[in-house]
Amino acid sequence: MLILTPASYQTAVKNWIVSVCIYQLIPLTLFSQVSDQEILLLQKLDSIQQTSSPAKHFASLYLKTTGVAAEFFQHDKPEVKQFILRLESRFAGYFFRSVEAFHMGHTIPMEWQAYFSDTVLSPLQYQLLGINAHINGDIWQALTTEFTLEEILENKKSYFDFQKGLIKIYRNFYESSVDTHAAIRLLRNSSFGLDKLYGKMMLAKWRKRQMDLAVLYHTDPSLFQKKLDRLHKKMDRLNQLILHHL
């Protein structure tokens, strides 16, 4: 007869919860093909989303996105999957370091300061602030830190292919926001639904801008810095809009 100690019982329960979460995100038929690195990433995001930290709100959205990415690239060539895995891991690190900085009372990276500026924002505000920080602030850093210029250029197609997977996440996020937030419903009604189309276009534009920045980082540092400075101003304006009007 197997006897579980309190510690081993807690570990077993936690592993069961994480497994249920992962199976909900990734079809059972594909689960065996998911790498250990991706499983660890999913577990870490799940652990954050179960805390009382403000970080839980973006972690929940991030968890869904990571699950969709794991499924989306399952049947791609090994070199494509390796590129995406490296990008995922490096990219997530910028969120994790900001979460750690917040809890340790250390200086939070500039991109994430608005997110952690208050502990009583609405889930929607946190999610939108997180999207702004992570997409507009972290992608170019992940690309330039993890890859050479040659690797970035070789994998541009795979990077942009995932736009199809992100649209699925965006659609669900948008519909959920419309159902639960009067301001978003008003925006939808007053724009005759064009706000949804605009959101998709902006998502694609933001990701393209991050790829362009990553290339400029290697090829034209002066122009890169000018564009990055302008982007930081745009991010700040969007953060103020989210903080004060939603």
Image (cartoon, rainbow, N blue to C red):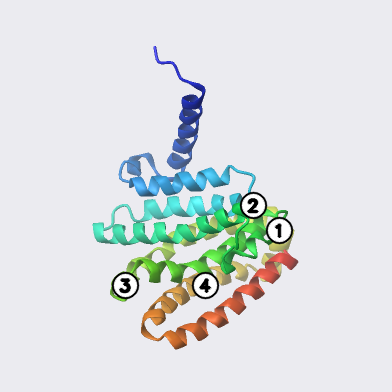
Left or right, 84 with respect to 9, comes to left
Disc on res. 78 = none
Tell me which label, 1 or 4, sits earlier in the chain. 1
Tell me which label, 4 or 2, sits earlier in the chain. 2
- Taking 158 as reference, is 33 above or below it? above
Q: Residue placed at 30% from the left, 45% from the top?
A: 33
Left or right, 31 with respect to 242, comes to left
Q: Which amino acid type is marked by label 2? A: Pro
Q: Residue placed at 39% from the left, 71% from the top?
A: 144
Splitting the image into 4 quarters, where does residue 244 fall?
A: bottom right
Q: Tag 4, which secondary structure?
A: helix
Q: Residue placed at 59% from the left, 63% from the top?
A: 108
Q: CA distance from mark 2 to mark 3?
A: 34 Å
Residue extending furthest toward the left:
78
Q: Nearer the viewer, mark 1 or mark 4?
A: 1
Task: Name the residue beneath numbered marker 1.
Answer: 118
Q: Tag 1, which secondary structure?
A: loop
Task: Name the residue beneath numbered marker 3.
Answer: 148
Q: CA distance from mark 2 to mark 1?
A: 8 Å
